[in-house]
Amino acid sequence: MNAPLLQVSGLKVAYGHVEAVKGIDLELHEGQITTLVGANGAGKSTTLLALSGLVKKSAGHVMFDGKDLTRMAPHKIVSSGVVQVAEGRATLTTLTVQENLELGAYTRRDRHSRVHELDYVFNLFPVLKERANGLAGNLSGGEQQMLAIGRALMAKPRVLLLDEPSMGLAPIIVQDIFRTLRDINRAGLTIFLVEQNVRQALKIADRAYVLETGCIVLGGTGRELLVNPKVQEAYLGS
Ligand SMILES: Nc1ncnc2c1ncn2[C@@H]1O[C@H](COP(=O)(O)OP(=O)(O)OP(=O)(O)O)[C@@H](O)[C@H]1O
Ligand SMILES: [Mg+2]
């Protein structure tokens, strides 16, 4: 197997005296979907925040394509190509859909390429194109999640980080979101997906990790974990 595109080693994060992430190792490989699953409070969001540079790491390293992101500022991490999708609710409701998307391209000066990205996002989410001049606040929950993903894509990421994009959405919309993630991935984007929707996440994942109280307890391909008896018992209700 090729060298990983992004490698996390020995990552620890503490909130005060409470260690939320206790020294984890994980790898993202170029062109793959990797998922991190686990129960409430396992430390999934904290892991993502650490990758994005939004919480302090108390130990460990993050290497991305030969660059050391460990102590890099959040905006530099974004411009280096590692971009986290904001929560759906974080769309700016008093701006139009298109204005929200254009904000996602703030790190990119080149107008020509911005137009290209906008076309790509509108193509991926036709509903956003239809509603381009409408206020983002009038979108449904699922559409706001699509807008959040679209906004991240405007930064032309090489790695897309997502924190529970299916949360709070109706099952049919969840299917849409997962299908879209697969499409984006097939177009070449490397994805790191944090999910409590373990079954769906494992189904689309090339590789997967299970996080329990800050420690990675299992790893393998998505398929391996789907049929793993421990995973089935603890996370798949069977
Ligand atoms: N800002 C914070 N201050 C103090 N403790 C925090 C903070 N954020 C998270 N924690 C604690 O760190 C641990 C990991 O939380 P985290 O949000 O990373 O888990 P999670 O796996 O994303 O959970 P969920 O599935 O509920 O989103 C939990 O015990 C949580 O209570
Ligand atoms: Mg979380």
Image (cartoon, rainbow, N blue to C red):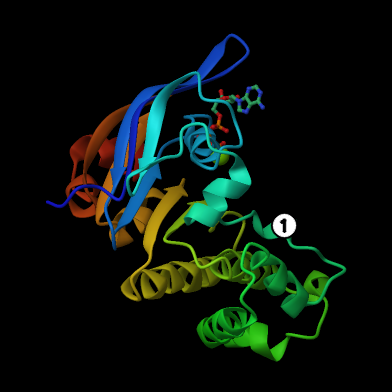
User: What is the residue that sits farthest to the right in this orientation?
Assistant: 94
Which residue lies at the image location 39% right of the left edge and 42% below the top edge?
37
**Where's residue 3, x and y in %?**
19, 48
**Where's residue 107, x and y in %?**
63, 62
Q: Is residue 40 above or below residue 172?
A: above
Q: Is residue 72 above or below residue 189?
A: above
Identify the residue position indicated by label 1 in the image: 89
Q: Is residue 64 above or below residue 131?
A: above
Which residue lies at the image location 40% right of the left edge and 35% below the top edge?
62
The answer to whether 178 appears left or right of 88 in the picture is: left
Q: Quadrant of the C terminus?
A: top left
**205 or 69, which is in the foreground?**
69
Which residue lies at the image location 59% right of the left edge and 84% below the top edge?
112
The answer to whether 42 appears left or right of 228 in the picture is: right
Let me know if residue 185 appears in the view. yes
Residue 229 falls in which quadrant of the image? top left
**58 or 237, which is in the foreground?**
58
**Where's residue 50, x and y in %?**
52, 34
**Where's residue 25, x and y in %?**
31, 31
Residue 117 falls in which quadrant of the image? bottom right
User: What is the residue that sits farthest to the bottom in this orientation?
Assistant: 130
Let me know if residue 213 appears in the view. no
